[in-house]
Every structure is written in structure tokens, then in C-alpha cells.
């Protein structure tokens, strides 16, 4: 089954699966989005902390921390345990 997700304003440039249910996407719009593919309303989180295109994503083996890298040469670590619907790197 094919599924289309809306959300990023510009192209999605990186993808990473977590636990076969959650897909994270990084975009040229500088954001990271987590979507739970088991739910119709799939958006879990939006992370904003980069000033340029997000070009790499990787979940820690235990699925508690997501690392995002971007063309701004910054690495952001996102703690899934304190996730909210929308967060920036400065808000924690």
C-alpha cells in the first residue's frame, strides 16, 4: 500500500525508520518531521533547529534519540522522551 504524507514545504532530502512504524524525514525546508505510519493522522513531532537543508538522519539503536545533520554543519540531537508536537533546538 502506498501512502502520501503532506507537511514539508520543500523536498524531503533524508529519511530514517524507527521501529518499522515511525518514519523521520528531513527537508530542504530545514525541519525534521516524525510520522507514525500506523495512524491516519500520522504526524508526531516537528523539529526545527537547522538553518539549512537537513541532509542526514539516524535514530539511536534504542530509539530514544534522533540525530539530524544539515548543510549548516550542525548536528542536533532530539530526545524522543521529551517530544512535543513542535520543538526548536533552542527550546530543548
Image (cartoon, helix red, strand yellow):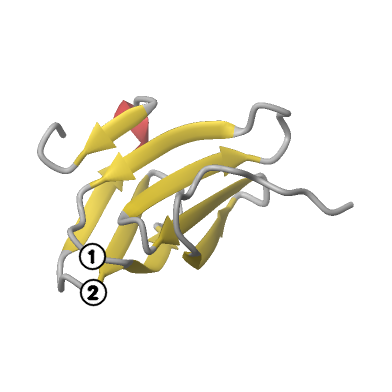
The disc placed on residue 52 is: 1
Q: Position of residue 75 (x, y in %)?
A: 19, 64
Residue at 69% across / 40% down in the picture?
37
Residue at 73% across / 35% down in the picture?
38
Q: Position of residue 57 (x, y in %)?
A: 40, 64
Under circle 1, the secondary element is: loop
Residue at 41% across / 63% down in the picture?
58
**Residue 83 in sight in this render:** no
Question: For residue 43, what is the image quadrant?
Answer: top right
Residue beneath disc 2: 71
Most foreground residue, 4 or 17: 4
Most foreground residue, 34 or 72: 72
From this view, report whether residue 30 is shown above or below residue 92: below
- Give the side of residue 66 with respect to residue 35, left or right: left
Q: Earlier in the sequence, mark 2 or mark 1?
A: 1
Q: Is label 2 in contact with label 1 (beta carbons under 8 Å)?
A: yes
Query: Of all residues shown, which one is farthest toward the right?
Result: 1
Q: CA distance from mark 2 to mark 1?
A: 5 Å
Q: Position of residue 66 (x, y in %)?
A: 36, 52
| Crowdedness near tag 1: few (<14), some (14–19) or many (≥20) residues, C-alpha within 10 Å | some
Amino acid at each position: 500500500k502506498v501512502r502520501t504524507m503532506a507537511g514539508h514545504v520543500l523536498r524531503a532530502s533524508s529519511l530514517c525508520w524507527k521501529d518499522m512504524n515511525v518514519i523521520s524525514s528531513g527537508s530542504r525546508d530545514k525541519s525534521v518531521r516524525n510520522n507514525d505510519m500506523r495512524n491516519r493522522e500520522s504526524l508526531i513531532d516537528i523539529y526545527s533547529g537547522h538553518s539549512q537543508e537537513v541532509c542526514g538522519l539516524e535514530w539511536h539503536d534504542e530509539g530514544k534519540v534522533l540525530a539530524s545533520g544539515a548543510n549548516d554543519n550542525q548536528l542536533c540531537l532530539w530526545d524522543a522522551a521529551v517530544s512535543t508536537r513542535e520543538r526548536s533546538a533552542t527550546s530543548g
